[in-house]
C-alpha cells in the first residue's frame, strides 16, 4: 500500500469522505481504514479512464458483431442459393448410379460432422472477411478487503460504491445471502427459457420465413441457425453471470463494477456458483471490490470442491489486490458507549426486563399510530410469510416463530425490507442442541444489519454469552446445511456442473468443523458485532 498522505484525495471520493467523517467526530481515525480509503480512491480514479476505454471497446465490439452477423447471413444465403440451384437443375441430370453413390456417401458420414465442418469453414471465412474480434482494455485491479468483524470493511466499500454513481454505468452491490438468492432466481429463469424452445426458435429464425426459397432449403437454413445457437449456448452459470449486471443487457457500452459484501463458502453450491459467476464477470472486465472476514485462501478450509475453488483463487489473485483491514478494534461495539442512552437489549428474562420490553413496544407503536394487526408479506419464489404483529414499519415476533421454523434468508430479507424496527422476545441460550435455530438467527441478524433495521430484544443471557458452542447435542440433518439462504425443507438444488455436483458432501475435516460448531462460533462473532 502506498502512504495515504501521498495521495491527493478525489473530491467526493472515499478518502475525502472518510477524512471528513473523522474531522466531524463521527469516526475515530484508524490508519488501516485510511489506507484502504486511499486505495479505493485510487481505484476510483482509474475507473474513470477505464469507463471511457470500455465505452469505446463496446462500440467497436457492437459494430464488429453486427458486421459479422450480416456477413454470416450473406454466406448462408449464398450456400442456400447454391443448394436450391443444385436441387432444381443438377440433381435432375444425375444418373441413377450417381444418386445411389451420393446417398451411400452421405449415409457413411457421422451425423453432425457435415454441419460441424460447414460451421468451421464459415467461421474461417468470417475471420478473413471481418477480421479478429476487438481486444478489450485491461481492467484495473479490484480490491479484496478482509479482516476482523467491525473493522470497517463494509463501511469503506459502501463509501466507494456511493462515489461510483455517475462514474460507472453498470454497478451492483450485493450481500452474500442476496446474491445467492438472485443466482437461484436467474437459474430458474434460464432453465425456463431453455425449456420453452418453440418461442425461442420463432423469434431467432423469423428472418428466414420471408426468403424466396422452397421449404427444404428453409429447413436447412433453420438447421444451420439452430446448430450455431447450440454451439453458442452458455453454461448455466455463465448465462446467470451475464444477467448479474442487468443494466449491461440494455446498454452494453461502459465499464462494470461489482461490490460483494461478506464473501463466504458455506457449502458446495456457494463454491461452485461463486467460482463460475465471479470468474465469468472478472474474465469479461468487471472490477470486483469484495469484503470478507477471511483471506481468500482461508475461505474453504474444509476442502470442498478443491479444484473449482483453486480456479477461483487464481482468478482473484489475477484481478484483485488483497488488503488486510488489520485493526483489532470492533468499532460497532464502541457505538453504544459513544453517547447512546436508549437500551435495545434486555436481559435476563424476568418480570422487570419483560415489563421494560413491553413498555418500549407500546411507546414505539403508539408513536406510529398504535394499530397492531397481523399481515402477510410476499417473499421471493412466490412464497409469503405472516407477520403476527405489525404496526406501520414495526413488527414483533418471538424467537421460536422466527428461528424455530423452516424459514431462511429470503424470508428474513422480506421482513427487513418491510420493517425498520423489529422486536424479538425470548431469545434462548443457543447451544449445539439448537444449532439450526442459531444459524437462522445469525442469518436474520445479517439481513437486519444489511437493511439498517433497529433490533430490540428480550434475551436469557447477555450478548456475548448468548451462543454456548461447547454444549453437546444430538447430530443434525446434514441436508439442512445445503443452502442456508433458501427456505429449509425445500427441494435440493440443481446440479450446476458436471465437475461441481452440489450433492457432494464436505470433507472429513469439514464435517468435524461443522459438528464442532466452529463455523457457528465464527459467524456468531459477526452477529454479535452487527
Image: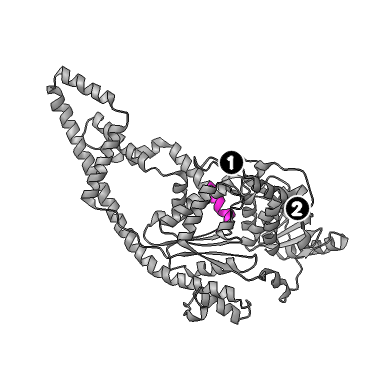
State which tag comes first along the sequence, 1 or 2: 2
Q: Determine the residue positioned at 71% across, 56% down.
A: 521
* Front label number (1 vs 2): 1
Question: Residue lying furthest front in this view?
Answer: 509
Q: Quadrant of residue 501?
A: top right
Compare residues 191 and 206 and report the one nearer the observer: 191
Tell me whether the residue at label 1 lies in contact with that at label 2, contact meaning CB atoms closer than 8 angstroms.
no
511 relative position to 428: left or right: left
Compare residues 262 and 254 and report the one nearer the observer: 262
Q: Which residues are magenta?
A: 174-184
Kindly state the secondary structure of the residue where label 1 is placed: loop
Q: Which residue is mark 1?
A: 504
Q: Determine the residue positioned at 16% across, 29% down.
A: 86
SS assignment for the magenta stretch, majority: helix
Q: Is residue 183 magenta?
A: yes
Residue 12 can be seen in this image: yes
Q: Determine the residue positioned at 29% across, 54% down.
A: 133
Mark 1, Cα crowd under 10 Å, few <14 / some 14-19 / many 20+, is: some
Q: Is residue 79 magenta?
A: no
Residue 369 can be seen in this image: no
Q: Determine the residue positioned at 64% across, 62% down.
A: 449
The image shows residue 145, relative to residue 19, as above or below, that is above
35 relative position to 42: left or right: right
Q: Position of residue 15 (x, y in %)?
A: 52, 76
Q: Which residue is mark 2?
A: 399
Amino acid at each position: 500500500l502506498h502512504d495515504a498522505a501521498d495521495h491527493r484525495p478525489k473530491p467526493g471520493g472515499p478518502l475525502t469522505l472518510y477524512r471528513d467523517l473523522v474531522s466531524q467526530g463521527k469516526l475515530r481515525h484508524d490508519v488501516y481504514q485510511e489506507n484502504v480509503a486511499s486505495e479505493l480512491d485510487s481505484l476510483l480514479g482509474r475507473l474513470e479512464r477505464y469507463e471511457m476505454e470500455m465505452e469505446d471497446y463496446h462500440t467497436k465490439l457492437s459494430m464488429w458483431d453486427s458486421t459479422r452477423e450480416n456477413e454470416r447471413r450473406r454466406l448462408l444465403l449464398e450456400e442456400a442459393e447454391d443448394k436450391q440451384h443444385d436441387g432444381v437443375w443438377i440433381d435432375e441430370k444425375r444418373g441413377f448410379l450417381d444418386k445411389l453413390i451420393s446417398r451411400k456417401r452421405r449415409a457413411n458420414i457421422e451425423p453432425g460432422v457435415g454441419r460441424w465442418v460447414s460451421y468451421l469453414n464459415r467461421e474461417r471465412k468470417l475471420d478473413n472477411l471481418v477480421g479478429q474480434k476487438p481486444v478489450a482494455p485491461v481492467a484495473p485491479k479490484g480490491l479484496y478487503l478482509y479482516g476482523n468483524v467491525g473493522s470497517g470493511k463494509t463501511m469503506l466499500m459502501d463509501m466507494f460504491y456511493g462515489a461510483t454513481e455517475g462514474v460507472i454505468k453498470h454497478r451492483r452491490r450485493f450481500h452474500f445471502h442476496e446474491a445467492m438468492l438472485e443466482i437461484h432466481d436467474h437459474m430458474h429463469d434460464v432453465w425456463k427459457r431453455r425449456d420453452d424452445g418453440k418461442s425461442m426458435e420463432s423469434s431467432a429464425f423469423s428472418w428466414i420465413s420471408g426468403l424466396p426459397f422452397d421449404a427444404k432449403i428453409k429447413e436447412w437454413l433453420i438447421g444451420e441457425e439452430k446448430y450455431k445457437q447450440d454451439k453458442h449456448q452458455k453454461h448455466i452459470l455463465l448465462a446467470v453471470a451475464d444477467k448479474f449486471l442487468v443494466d449491461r443487457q440494455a446498454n452494453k457500452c461502459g465499464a462494470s463494477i461489482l461490490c460483494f459484501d461478506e464473501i463466504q463458502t458455506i457449502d458446495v453450491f456457494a463454491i461452485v456458483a461463486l467460482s463460475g459467476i465471479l470468474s465469468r464477470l472478472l474474465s469479461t472486465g468487471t472490477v470486483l471490490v469484495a469484503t470478507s472476514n477471511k483471506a481468500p485462501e482461508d475461505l474453504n478450509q474444509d476442502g470442498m470442491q478443491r479444484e473449482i475453488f483453486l480456479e477461483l483463487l487464481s482468478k482473484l489473485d489475477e484481478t484483485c489486490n488483497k488488503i488486510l483491514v488489520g485493526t483489532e478494534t470492533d468499532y460497532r461495539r464502541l457505538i453504544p458507549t459513544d453517547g447512546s442512552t436508549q437500551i435495545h437489549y434486555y436481559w435476563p428474562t424476568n418480570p422487570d426486563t419483560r415489563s421494560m420490553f413491553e413498555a418500549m413496544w407500546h411507546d414505539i407503536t403508539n408513536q406510529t399510530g398504535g394499530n397492531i394487526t397481523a399481515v402477510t408479506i410476499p417473499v421471493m419464489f412466490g412464497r409469503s410469510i405472516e407477520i403476527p404483529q405489525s404496526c406501520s414499519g414495526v413488527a414483533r415476533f418471538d424467537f421460536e416463530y422466527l428461528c424455530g421454523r423452516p424459514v431462511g434468508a429470503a424470508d428474513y430479507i422480506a421482513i427487513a425490507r418491510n420493517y425498520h424496527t423489529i422486536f424479538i422476545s425470548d431469545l434462548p441460550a443457543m447451544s449445539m442442541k439448537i444449532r439450526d435455530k442459531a444459524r437462522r438467527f445469525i442469518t436474520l441478524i445479517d439481513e437486519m444489519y444489511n437493511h439498517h433495521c433497529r433490533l430490540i430484544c428480550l434475551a436469557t443471557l447477555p450478548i456475548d454469552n448468548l451462543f454456548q458452542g461447547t454444549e453437546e447435542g444430538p447430530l443434525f440433518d446434514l441436508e439442512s446445511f445445503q443452502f442456508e439462504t433458501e427456505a429449509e425443507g425445500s427441494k435440493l438444488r440443481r446440479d450446476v456442473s458436471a465437475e461441481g455436483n452440489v450433492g457432494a458432501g464436505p470433507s472429513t475435516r469439514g464435517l468435524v468443523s461443522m459438528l464442532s460448531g466452529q463455523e457457528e462460533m465464527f459467524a456468531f462473532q459477526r452477529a454479535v458485532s452487527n
